[in-house]
Image (cartoon, rainbow, N blue to C red):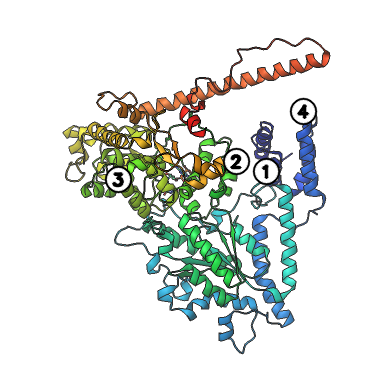
């Protein structure tokens, strides 16, 4: 067993997880491999799991089988290193081997780049030098630097922040790097195991035989190709939102070819944004991107003597065609991006490269699962019954802060997932968030108009307020509500705010200022360093009440502060003019006695604004009325059985879910197949009883109520879990008893008809609404 206490406990957890069925045997094996290293796994794993021989013979033999299959043929030598070291070696090899081969054989490879031939007619020069040169010179020759290229080199005398990537300086102060900085390249490496090896991230499904095969394949291919210089056409790795070297499937695929690898980054603002005013690249993200590119280039340069070719272009398809001509590349490899308009562009690029006889290969890495591969099979109509309320302290760095790194692919989601599995025992909420990231991309693929058009069609006609003063006050953090202002100022100054604050400011804009969520989406796109069309649009749609899974809560700007900033620390940091107020009044200065205000140096209306809107209850009521009006106007989008909103399901999803006939049969008068979606109870109630004065389902969260609700949910979950565990153990004994009696020929005990169920009968979500039966038949 492992030497360190750390590993012992890790091993225990892993074994427990495998026994409880939360991980498979091959996952277990890979994790052990990562923790103990190859040698110790080879020699110690059979002994470690021998207790299973009695306890769980099938599992035991499965593990032994995996173990022997993995180690049987592969010698334990230093060449079989894990992914990143492989990567490092391979990159070094692909550059060095070429150059040394040229020097030894005195042979110039057969396919130097066209431009290179132009420039070096007489000279014989090694291919690697040619490549290195090509990446520097390609920009100098074809186009003037100032207009089309972004060269990320100080020593080339080029501006590090070219115009088109530069953030609008008048608009933004320099972000506070001490608060939120770019990672050093080293920050992005995978964790080391005891042997100093890295986790093997190559196999997403932990398939040991696949892992082994691909390693062998890689070694073979490298050596085979390196021996035949005649086939050395380089490969272009087009970096997009995968600005890293580790766990990068496109880069690995390129290196596997054993030919020179040319790293490229292309920037086309209009293509990034698509046609629908998605604002995919706002000022803050450009700023982040700029630094991420610098880092990537630096890493390539320092560690591998390579460099990133960066070009700004109107059309990536043309730029790639040019690059292919310049370098003689036979293959372009990318990691897929999933925004529908970018996918369309990739399809177009693939076609066009095909005509040049260049292979365009796409790998998957941006999400955990490819959005196109997500199956709806097995998805029932169950609600999200035990959904825990979003909570978070804005005054503490309790969340991971990895969103921009994930957005630009500086960290891969798989790495995060694996680290989460390894470093923490139980992080379901965090894992759920990673899944939401995938969910956002899945939704964007289904509803490409999501950044601009409500997913619930009825809500297109909702009335919104167009008061520009409100919007600007919100954007600048001058609403007079300290928590909202603190969050918006943090966003402006750092390009980031945490999830809870995002909910607070979104609720405020939509439910209290009545400003269309699209304005919120746009502002976030421009100011967040992690601005992400898919996630941002999904969240604003949900906050704006027209999304697939709209929030079942509204954040009150004062009460929310009780939960997220109970001592006012956060608010004082970003609204320093209020710093002197006592805790009791920091979130509601308008209630502060004049003497306290004077002592704290606060003059409302002068150094801190009066509240933009004062009648919060009334404003919220109005927002409810607006929604009810929409629902009453568009009854065709309301399910008559459940009272829920309905959304049209895209045909292709319908066909994949219900089979080829699905698309024809089940369409109503709107010409679409409509599916009921979760709808706030207060909307249903008020739609049925518009003049009712009461609102038993009021969704406005009170800080303390929120906390109490968390505790109640945790308590209920625990009871539910304990009850079902006891029930299952009882059933297991029951089954054993019956088997023994059967074997011994004894009469069987009477069945207990009142067995408790894991899912209670009263769970309304398990009942399929009659509407569905009606439609499905
Ligand atoms: C109105 C609104 C707009 C948002 N816009 C964006 C955006 O443009 N880009 C963005 O990355 N996140 C967005 N989020 C989601 C969330 O607020 C951020 O991902 C989170 O605050 C980032 O901090 P973290 O890395 O510490 O998150 P953690 O809580 O540590 O979560 C880890 C990762 O999970 C993912 N994640 C977390 N929450 C969500 C979520 N609700 N939906 C999908 N993925 C999630 C992110 O990639 C995040 O980095 C938005 C939320 C709201 C309410």
| Sequence-first disc among 3 and 4 | 4
Contact between marks 1 and 2 (CB within 8 A): the answer is yes
Identify the disc placed on residue 421.
Answer: 2
Q: In which quarter of the image is residue 509?
A: top left
- Mark 2 and mark 3 lie on one chain; the one further toward the N terminus is 2
Q: Mark 4 points at which residue?
A: 55
**CA distance for labels 4 and 1:** 21 Å
Name the spot of residue 551 as percent of width and height, x first: 39, 36
* SS under mark 3: loop
Nearer to us of marks 1 and 3 is 3
- Contact between marks 3 and 4 (CB within 8 A): the answer is no
Residue designated by label 3: 516
The x and y percentages for residue 478 are 24, 46
For label 4, being within 8 Å of ligand 1 is answered no
Q: Which residue is drawn at 56% across and 69% down?
A: 353
In the picture, which quadrant includes the N terminus? top right
Depth check: give the residue in front, 484 or 197. 484
- The residue nearer to you, when weighing 207 against 32, is 207
Relative to 64, is 404 on the left or the right?
left
Q: Please tell me whether mark 2 sits on a helix, a strand or a loop.
A: helix
Is residue 433 at all visible to an observer of this figure?
A: no
Mark 1 or mark 3, earlier in chain: 1
Q: Quadrant of residue 596?
A: top left
Disc 1 to disc 3, C-alpha distance: 47 Å
For the residues labelled 2 and 3, the Cα–Cα distance comes to 39 Å
Ligand 1 image position (quadrant): top left
Query: Pointer 4 and pointer 1: residues touching (CB < 8 Å)?
Result: no
Q: Residues within 10 Å of mark 2 (few under 14, many from 20)?
A: some
């Amino acid at each position: 067993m492992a030497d360190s206490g750390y590993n012992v406990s890790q091993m225990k957890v892993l074994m427990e997880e495998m026994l409880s069925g939360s991980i498979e045997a091959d996952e277990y094996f890979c994790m052990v491999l990562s923790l103990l290293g190859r040698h110790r796994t080879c020699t110690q794993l059979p002994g470690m799991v021998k207790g299973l021989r009695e306890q769980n013979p099938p599992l035991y033999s499965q593990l032994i089988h995996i173990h022997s299959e993995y180690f049987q043929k592969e010698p334990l030598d230093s060449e079989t290193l894990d992914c990143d070291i492989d990567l490092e070696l391979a990159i070094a090899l692909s550059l060095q081997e070429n150059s040394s081969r040229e020097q030894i054989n005195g042979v110039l490879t057969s396919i130097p780049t066209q431009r290179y031939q132009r420039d070096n007619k007489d000279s014989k020069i090694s291919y690697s030098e040619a490549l290195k040169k090509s990446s520097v010179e390609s920009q100098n020759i074809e186009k003037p630097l100032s207009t089309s290229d972004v060269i990320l080199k100080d020593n080339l005398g080029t501006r590090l922040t070219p115009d088109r990537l530069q953030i609008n300086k008048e608009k933004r102060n320099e972000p506070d790097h001490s608060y939120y900085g770019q990672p050093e390249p080293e920050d992005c490496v995978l964790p080391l195991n005891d042997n100093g090896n890295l986790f093997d991230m190559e196999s997403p499904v932990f398939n040991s035989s696949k892992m082994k095969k691909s390693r062998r394949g890689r070694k073979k291919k490298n050596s085979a190709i390196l021996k035949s210089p005649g086939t050395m056409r380089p490969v272009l790795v087009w970096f997009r939102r995968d600005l890293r070297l580790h766990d990068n499937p496109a880069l690995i695929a390129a290196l596997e070819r054993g030919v020179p690898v040319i790293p490229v980054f292309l920037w086309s603002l209009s293509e990034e944004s698509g046609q629908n005013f998605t604002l995919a690249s706002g000022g803050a993200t450009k700023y982040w991107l700029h630094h991420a590119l610098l880092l990537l280039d630096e890493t390539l340069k320092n560690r591998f003597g390579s460099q990133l070719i960066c070009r700004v272009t109107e059309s990536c398809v043309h730029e790639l065609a040019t690059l292919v001509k310049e370098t003689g590349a036979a293959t372009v490899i990318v990691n897929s991006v999933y925004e529908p308009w970018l996918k369309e562009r990739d399809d177009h690029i693939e076609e066009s490269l095909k005509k040049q006889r260049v292979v365009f290969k796409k790998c998957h890495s941006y999400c955990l699962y490819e959005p196109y591969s997500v199956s709806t099979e097995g998805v029932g109509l169950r609600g999200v019954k035990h959904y825990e309320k979003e909570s978070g302290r804005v005054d503490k760095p309790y969340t991971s802060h990895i969103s921009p790194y994930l957005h630009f692919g500086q960290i891969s989601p798989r790495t995060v997932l694996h680290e989460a599995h390894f470093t923490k025992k139980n992080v379901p909420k965090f894992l759920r968030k990673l899944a939401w990231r995938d969910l956002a991309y899945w939704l964007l693929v289904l509803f490409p108009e999501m950044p601009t058009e409500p997913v619930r069609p009825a809500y297109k006609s909702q009335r919104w307020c167009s008061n520009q003063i409100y919007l600007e006050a919100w954007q600048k953090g001058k609403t007079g509500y300290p928590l909202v202002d603190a969050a918006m100022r943090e966003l402006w100054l750092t390009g980031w705010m945490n999830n809870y604050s995002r909910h607070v400011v979104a609720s405020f804009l939509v439910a209290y200022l009545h400003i269309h969520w699209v304005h919120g989406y746009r502002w976030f796109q421009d100011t967040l360093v992690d601005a992400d069309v898919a996630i941002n649009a999904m969240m604003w749609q949900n906050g704006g009440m027209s999304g697939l899974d709209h929030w079942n809560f509204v954040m009150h700007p004062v009460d929310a502060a009780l939960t997220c900033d109970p001592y006012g620390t956060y608010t004082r940091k970003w609204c320093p003019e209020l710093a002197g107020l006592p805790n009791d009044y920091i979130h509601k200065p308008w209630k502060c006695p004049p003497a306290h205000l004077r002592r704290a140096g606060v003059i409302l209306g002068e150094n801190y604004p009066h509240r933009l809107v004062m009648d919060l209850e009334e404003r919220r009521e109005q927002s409810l009325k607006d929604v009810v009006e929409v629902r009453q106007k568009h009854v065709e989008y309301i399910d008559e059985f459940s009272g829920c909103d309905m959304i049209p399901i895209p045909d292709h999803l319908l066909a994949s879910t219900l089979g080829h006939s699905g698309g024809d049969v089940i369409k109503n008068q709107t010409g679409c197949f409509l599916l009921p979606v979760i709808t706030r109870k207060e909307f249903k109630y008020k739609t049925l009883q518009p003049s009712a004065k009461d609102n038993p389902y009021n969704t406005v969260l009170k800080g303390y109520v929120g906390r109490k609700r968390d505790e109640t949910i945790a308590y209920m979950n625990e009871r539910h879990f304990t009850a079902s565990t006891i029930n299952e153990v009882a059933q297991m004994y029951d089954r054993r008893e019956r088997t023994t009696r059967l074997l011994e020929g004894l009469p069987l005990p009477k069945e207990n008809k009142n067995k408790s169920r894991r899912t209670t009968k009263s769970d309304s979500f398990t009942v399929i609404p009659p509407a569905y039966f009606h439609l499905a038949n």
